[in-house]
Image (spheres, rainbow, N blue to C red):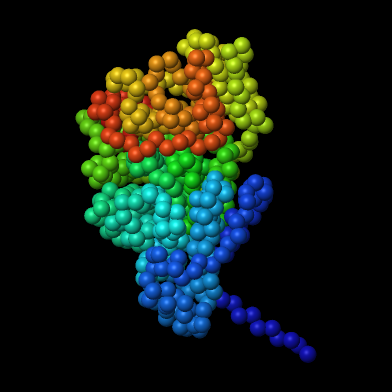
Amino acid sequence: MNCRSLFVHFSPACKIEVPERLTVSHGALVRNGLTDRCICLPVREAVDAEILLVHSEEYLEAVKQTPHMTLEDLKEFTLQYGDVYFHPNIYHCAKLAVGSALQLVDSVLMGKVKNGMALVRPPGHHSMRSAANGFCVFNNVAIAAQYAKQKYGVKRILIVDWDIHHGQGVQYCFEDDPSVLYFSWHRYEHQKFWPNLKDSDYDIVGKGEGAGFNINVPWNKVGMENSDYLSVFCHLLLPIAYEFCPDLVLVCAGFDSAIGDPEGEMCATPDIFAHLTYLLMNLAEGKLCAVLEGGYNLTSLAQSVCQTVQTLLGDPLPPLTNLTGPCRSTLESLQCVRAAHRQHWSCLRHAGTISTKRIKLSGEGNKDEAEVGEEQKSPEEKIWPEPPKRICPPVCSAVVLPDGVVCPDIIILFQIRNGLALVGDAAMTMTCVVQYVAAEVDSRYELIKNFPFPSQGCTDTSGFAQAMFSLLLPLGYQYNPSLVLLVRMPGSGVCDIMWQQLTGLLQSFAHGHTLVLLQEDDKACVGPTASILLGNPAPPLGQLPASLKEDAEAVERLRSRLQADWNLLLTTGESTK
Ligand SMILES: NCCCNCCCCCC(=O)CS
Ligand SMILES: [Zn+2]
């Protein structure tokens, strides 16, 4: 008897939001030995009450009917929404996605884990109170934020949405809520890109009490690179995030903003997510929950997920190379967003007060004029180097006491990751180390000394934070040192928690090879510094007040003078020359 088998082949309605996204990402985590170093949290379905934290009863009731619908009914059902596909099993999957995010929030807020990532499908950030949209059914991250506020009394939550689409669902949910700061960058192309909303533009800053707590950064060109992403973090997100001082950071971790993605058509490489993650881990004492959103190039998605998880595990960051500086379109967006938010955030108050004029940007060519060859390639044809192995030296930190000898090469030669030394004369030792490093180990070193501040006495924390983000970070990234020498000069006036934040942030460079020199009578600083070098999060600075005018202007003048040579310092498309 010839058995006839009937293959009913569902031609996938959606070609990019496919199951392989999770299997390939998880497979890469396993292959890189990362799942062995994580604890795998159990998933659960969200219950109605949790879904109703964001969605309406009528919407939930409607979605509840979908498992019993025929294919025809399902198609009919989706017509009322935009760009979303329903399957008889999607209600179950959507409840698991929400439940997973909530399990992660529970584990982080109960202190069972430091941080974590939820690899979920379907994504959530486009879904709205009474509507599915853009592959999203329930808004996983928005529900997680409301859940954290309701169950744990969390006061301030920062949501960073680095997915290439605007999470309008999250924006609408919190636009009048000052306890949730929502930051999103997204491909916009002057409203020509999906979801084509005027609400996604830079001038939508939140409403009523929530004014200032919604930040939209529109990408009006494709092909954005690592420099563009870093400059938005350094000159916009981080200063505001530190002023906001969140108790919890949630990330709408979409990786369609990575190179090769058919939706994003950007050129940022997977290792950028190691840095974006790390920069956010210095907030909220490291309490960070990343929840997967988009990401449709299976190669860059898997690499980006591994880069993110490896950073959450505390591994050294891969140095970012050839940062050419932001392109003109980025600078225009950056200037517009900073201007729109200047009245809401004191860190931006003195921004751009220095008179400026136009200069040609080095990074300009890569977006505006098509480069031969590269530009013609479709996203899928793009190629990029595999992210480098991020080796973890056997020893994390060393402490050299007064009778010991400071030998920086043990740090550079990867025997240990970082170290601190208590020395008789910090200034003199610094000179010796610099000469030693320059002579012995032909490495580039970055000499970090406290920036000259006009304000007397204890350096103003806000002013120092300004200098960290708008000067030190961009310079450090562009300089790309192989060793960071951090010297605490006697009478520097930098208060301990700012010192700890600085020590933490500087590990973004040089594979985390930081050598800290402390004056031996500065014993009180050894513990706090060693704690950071060992990978513990720095305590919060507290909500930052406005920086002293003279400090902010000193930083602006320094930035304006240096930016012609270091254009990651740029925040506008002009500079004094
Ligand atoms: N109607 C013209 C094309 C529309 N494309 C919609 C793509 C939705 C993508 C949603 C997504 O990636 C979530 S992160
Ligand atoms: Zn997306």
Residue 36, image x, y percentages: 67, 49
Residue name at image x 54 percent, y 58 percent: 103
Residue 174, image x, y percentages: 33, 57
Residue 21, image x, y percentages: 56, 59
- Residue 495 vertical placement versus 369 (above, below): above
Residue name at image x 36 percent, y 67 percent: 129
Q: In this view, does 566 lie to the left or right of 313?
A: left
Q: Which of 169 and 189 is in front in this view?
A: 169
Q: Residue furthest bottom?
A: 1
Identify the image quadrant of the N terminus.
bottom right
- Residue 523 vertical placement versus 432 (above, below): below
Q: Is residue 501 left or right of residue 30?
A: left
Res. 103 in view:
yes
- Residue 229 vertical placement versus 163 (above, below): above
Residue 369, image x, y percentages: 36, 44
Identify the image quadrant of the C terminus.
top left
Q: Which of 372 and 71 is in front in this view?
A: 71
Residue name at image x 63 percent, y 51 percent: 39
Residue name at image x 32 percent, y 19 percent: 457
Count of numbered circles on the image? 0
- Residue 387 vertical placement versus 60 (above, below): above
Res. 321 in view:
no
